[in-house]
């Protein structure tokens, strides 16, 4: 399977510029899940910029109907 990195970058809202995984979703997801986190693309832009990508933060946003 061919990586669609260029296509993925168009929808990547990750604000961490030096990230080597940008656009490589499988690597990004693997990295974050290992730390009990979700990638930035799972969060609204304002929430993503907090860099709190924890499951708990995501659950709070869902409970507050912000996602």
Image: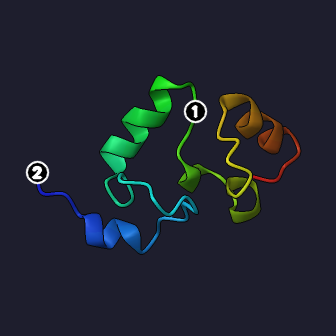
Taking the image as shown, residue 56 lies to the left or right of residue 41, namely right
In this rendering, is residue 65 above or below 17? above
Determine whether the residue tagged by mark 2 lies in a helix, strand or loop: loop
Camera-side residue of 55 and 65: 55
Q: Which of the 4 image quarters holds residue 36?
A: top right
Furthest residue toward left: 1
Determine whether the residue tagged by mark 1 lies in a helix, strand or loop: loop
Query: Which residue is under mark 1?
Result: 37
What's the colour scheme? rainbow
How packed mark 1 is, by other alpha carbons closer than 10 Å (few <14, some 14-19, many 20 or more), is some
Residue 61: percent from left, percent from top: 80, 44
Residue 54: percent from left, percent from top: 66, 33
Furthest residue toward front: 18
In this rendering, is residue 19 above or below 12? above
- Specify the label residue 1 is tagged with: 2
How packed mark 2 is, by other alpha carbons closer than 10 Å (few <14, some 14-19, many 20 or more), is few
């Amino acid at each position: 399977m061919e990586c669609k990195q260029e296509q993925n970058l168009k929808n990547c809202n990750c604000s961490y510029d030096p990230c080597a995984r940008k656009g490589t979703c499988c690597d990004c997801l693997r990295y974050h899940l290992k730390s009990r986190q979700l990638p930035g693309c799972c969060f609204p832009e304002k929430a993503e910029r907090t860099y709190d990508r924890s499951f708990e933060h995501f659950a709070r946003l869902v409970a507050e109907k912000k996602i």
